Image (cartoon, rainbow, N blue to C red):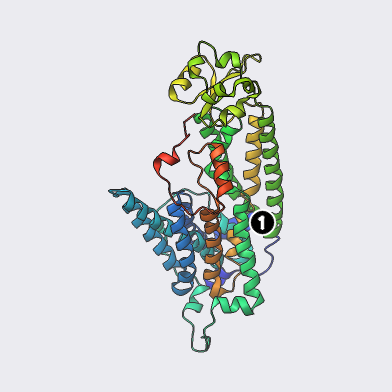
Amino acid sequence: MEGVLHGGGGGGEGTSFRDCLALATKNPYILRLAFSAGIGRLLFGYDTVSTALAGAIIGAAVGGWFNDRYGRRTAILVADFLFFAGSVLMAAAPGPAVLIVGRVFVGGGVGMASMTSPLYISEASPAKVRGALNRAEKPKPKQSSEKSTLPKKSNPRWKPFATPSKKTRPKKKTTLMQLVRTKNTVRRALFAGVGLQIFQQFVGINTVMYYSPTIVQLAGFASNQTALLLSLVTAGLNAFGSIVSVYFIDRTGRKKLLIVSLCGVVVSLGVLSGIFHETTVRAPAVSAVETMSNSFGSYACPDYRLAGRHSSDWDCTTCLKASSGCGFCSSSTSKLFPGACLMSNDTVKGLCHGEHREWYTRGCPSSFGWVALIGLALYIIFFSPGMGTVPWVVNSEIYPLRFRGVGGGIAATASLFFVLVCVPETKGLPIEEVEKMLETRSLHFKFWKKRGASMKGGDEV
């Protein structure tokens, strides 16, 4: 079994997806290992809240040491227990304090599982299909983690190191930091691994995945339901990209896949930036006749009233940025009277819909909406097979065996720490308040806000 698990050495670059299928048919045990170890990765993104993310940082950091000390299988079981305990606490929480503790437990399990699963799969897979098996675990249905990990054996590569003989046991222990300072291999591996994880965040994937409905609305789709349905495209393409990476990651190599992915991401983000710029520049003007008409006059935006003679310069973008919190009631049938700038509340929203018009509070009407959606889809298509998968695969391969867990834990912690500290919480905040927050704060340590502050200006569309 050990010989089959370790597989052949070279030839990884010329392999094809058929090798993975042939191996699975010949020895399904390896596929079962990849399947059961990878289930834990499905927990990633289950709770997208800051307290869970803080727990994930702790879980990833401690998980690196725990993996090297007690083994991959034990680490996966501990991650399962943390997630189970956190879920029970959240379900039975009598108040916010217990709920937060439960989220921290869940985050700890997610953090530990996210860096342990790639390690186990990489070490238990033949070199020719290691990348494919590492990514094949991503787009599959959720099953019980405990059930699948209990029968699993300890990893064959880690086990000799965990229980060394007297001949192989080193006379003096060497710490990771000592190796980083003295050995180029570890230093270069850690630099590459941490850099990949941080730059994975720099390309903005969390913003796209968490706020895709808002991005769709900013592109010109008014309805919440429409925006939510269209945002499902990003989730579907993300899963599709993972399947694509299974085919290409061992065929073309990690580095080529990263370069193609980054080039596509840059082009896609450039397209999206251009579209949103054009949407802002070509925003429909506010019609003074409609805004002050008998139908809407009593609900006119307060800032628009105070603008006086400067109100003639107002367009939809200016209306939505008004400090008093206003919305744009658009008329798609009249170019002479494109829309009215009104107070944003449920009464006005219903009045606007009663006139067979569209109500906008996050984005303006635009003919570029579908082009923006295509740009968003291209971004996911390019990101998922490369920058979405390769950093995790590379981090499970490049470190020396005895420090592979710690190295992977440091890299995963760097990624999560960047999200926690540098990414602001924008829920319920108008665009202008987000800009003010970014002007005054560069670090974002707060995990939660008071309910009143978070809902300020956060009217539903």
Q: Is residue 53 left or right of residue 181?
A: left
- Locate residue 202 relative to residue 425 in the image: left or right: right
In the rendered picture of this protein, how many numbered marks are placed on residues? 1
Residue at position x 30%, y 48% in the image? 95
Q: Quadrant of residue 287?
A: top right
Residue 61, image x, y percentages: 49, 65
Q: Residue at x 51, y 10 (%)?
A: 294
Q: Which residue appears at 68% of the width and 55% of the height?
A: 258
Residue 451 visible somewhere in the drawing? yes
Residue 344 coordinates in the image, percent (x, y): 48, 26
Q: Amino acid at mark 1?
A: Ser
* Residue drawn at point x = 47 percent, y = 31 percent: 459
Instruction: Name the element at disc 1.
Output: loop
160 versus 437 height, above or below: below
Q: Left or right: 147 with respect to 265?
A: left
Residue highlighted by disc 1: 16
